[in-house]
């Protein structure tokens, strides 16, 4: 089966823009699902992963960069080209990055993106002429993106919504509005959302394809299971949603109740917070070098995985299907929220847990 030809008669060029390890993982899952052997690919003119170039818009955070480099190696192992861009390496970096990508953007037939909220990605969308646009999961933000697109709202991350737009938001508003229009299907423009999240408000014309982590399951595992429980960390403190002291207490109570011994840190969790957590709870803090879905699939992993509301309550049951691992989720008590948390935070977090499948739901610690 030959790839679909582009306007030049050559195989269709696909550019994928990623800024996090999870986004890169989900581009690999998308390419696998739409390839000649994937369920989605059988109904397509050719493998969507053909002529795929992954463009890493590298962040500055060392943990994220390390995971991205490991994921980039896996992508190369799969036969894809990876273009690493120091997109935030100084004041002139964005100009060099955008200038260097202008040609490939204009030639691309398909654009895949992991974060439609990213100002970088929104700016790049103003350059491309691609008729096929694909959004792959960037965690729970995907649910909010689809809902905002359906309602015609401006694209704003859920934990920021409710505040007044700042000066930078107002300055960037025309670019954001242009990106929202580009991400709305119409005419010859096609839009796809590739997601493991529940998508209930998809706009007319947006194709929704399920991500079941088939590539991850085929590539890794099954894992060896340990007798204990593992706990998954979250960056809700770092994003200003949950109070740090309340979070620490909840982690300690949850670990004690379920016999957890390891804490898998989120890549955005601060070193100071993790040091305090290890000291006060006795948990072994693990800094994963790959997304948790791959770490868990490789093993060893606990027979029970404990989490707070986050992306992993949707992805881990899929990645660990058939292994016997139980994923249990602890709700966020409203008293844990900070005074500056978005008014929508509690409802959104409850929705993340309530819509997850194949999980065991736990009450917030301290509740009956």
Image (cartoon, rainbow, N blue to C red):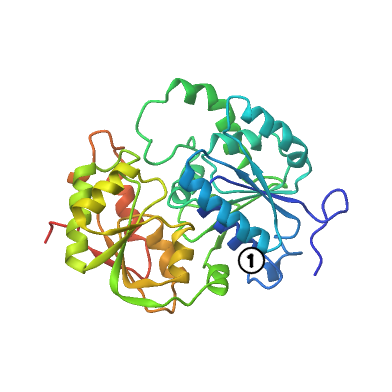
Residue picked out by circle 1: 32
Asked if residue 361 lies left or right of residue 190, the reply is left
Q: Look at 81% across and 66% down and name the residue there.
A: 2
Q: Look at 33% across and 48% down and name the residue there.
A: 348
What percent of the width, then of the height, locates residue 357? 38, 67
Q: Quadrant of residue 303?
A: bottom left
What percent of the width, then of the height, locates residue 25? 55, 58
- The N terminus lies in which quarter of the figure? bottom right
Q: Look at 53% across and 21% down and name the residue there.
A: 171
Badge 1 density bin: few <14, some 14–19, many ≥20, Cα 10 Å: many
Residue 81 against residue 270 in the figure, above or below: below
Q: Quadrant of residue 233?
A: bottom left
What percent of the width, then of the height, locates residue 232? 33, 59
Q: Look at 20% across and 61% down and name the residue there.
A: 254
Secondary structure type for disc 1? helix
Q: Nearer the viewer, residue 154 or 58?
A: 58
- The C terminus lies in which quarter of the figure? bottom left
Q: Let me know if residue 20 appears in the view.
A: no
């Amino acid at each position: 089966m030959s790839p679909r030809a582009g306007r030049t008669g050559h195989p269709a060029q696909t550019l994928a823009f990623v800024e996090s390890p999870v986004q890169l993982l989900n581009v690999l899952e998308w390419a696998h699902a739409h390839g000649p052997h994937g369920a989605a690919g059988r109904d397509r003119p050719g493998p969507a992963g053909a002529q795929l170039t992954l463009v890493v818009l590298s962040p500055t955070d060392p943990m994220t960069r390390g995971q991205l480099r490991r994921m980039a190696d896996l992508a190369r192992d799969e036969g894809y080209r990876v273009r690493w861009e120091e997109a935030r390496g100084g004041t002139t970096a964005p100009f060099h990055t955008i200038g260097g990508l202008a040609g490939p953007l204009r030639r691309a037939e398909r654009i895949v993106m992991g974060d439609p909220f990213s100002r970088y990605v929104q700016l790049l969308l103003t350059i491309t002429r691609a008729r096929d646009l694909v959004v792959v999961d960037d965690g729970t933000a995907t649910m909010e993106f689809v809902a905002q697109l359906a309602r015609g709202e401006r694209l704003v991350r859920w934990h920021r919504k409710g505040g007044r737009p700042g000066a930078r938001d107002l300055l960037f508003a025309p670019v954001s509005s242009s990106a929202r229009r580009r991400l709305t299907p119409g005419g010859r423009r096609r839009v796809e959302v590739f997601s493991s999240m529940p998508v209930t408000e998809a706009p007319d014309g947006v194709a929704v394809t399920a991500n079941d982590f088939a590539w991850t399951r085929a590539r890794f595992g099954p894992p060896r299971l340990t007798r204990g429980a593992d706990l998954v960390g979250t960056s809700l403190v770092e994003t200003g949603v949950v109070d740090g002291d309340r979070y620490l207490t909840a982690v300690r109570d949850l670990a004690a109740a379920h016999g957890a011994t390891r804490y898998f840190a989120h890549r955005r969790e601060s070193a100071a917070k993790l040091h305090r957590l290890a000291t006060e709870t006795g948990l072994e803090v693990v800094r994963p070098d790959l997304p948790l879905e791959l770490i868990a699939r490789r093993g060893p992993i606990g027979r029970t995985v404990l989490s707070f509301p986050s992306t992993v309550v949707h992805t881990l049951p899929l990645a660990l299907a058939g292994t016997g691992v139980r994923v249990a989720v602890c709700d966020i008590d409203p008293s844990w929220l900070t005074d500056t948390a978005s008014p929508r935070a509690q409802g959104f977090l409850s929705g993340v847990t309530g819509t997850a499948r194949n999980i065991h739901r736990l009450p917030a610690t301290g509740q009956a």
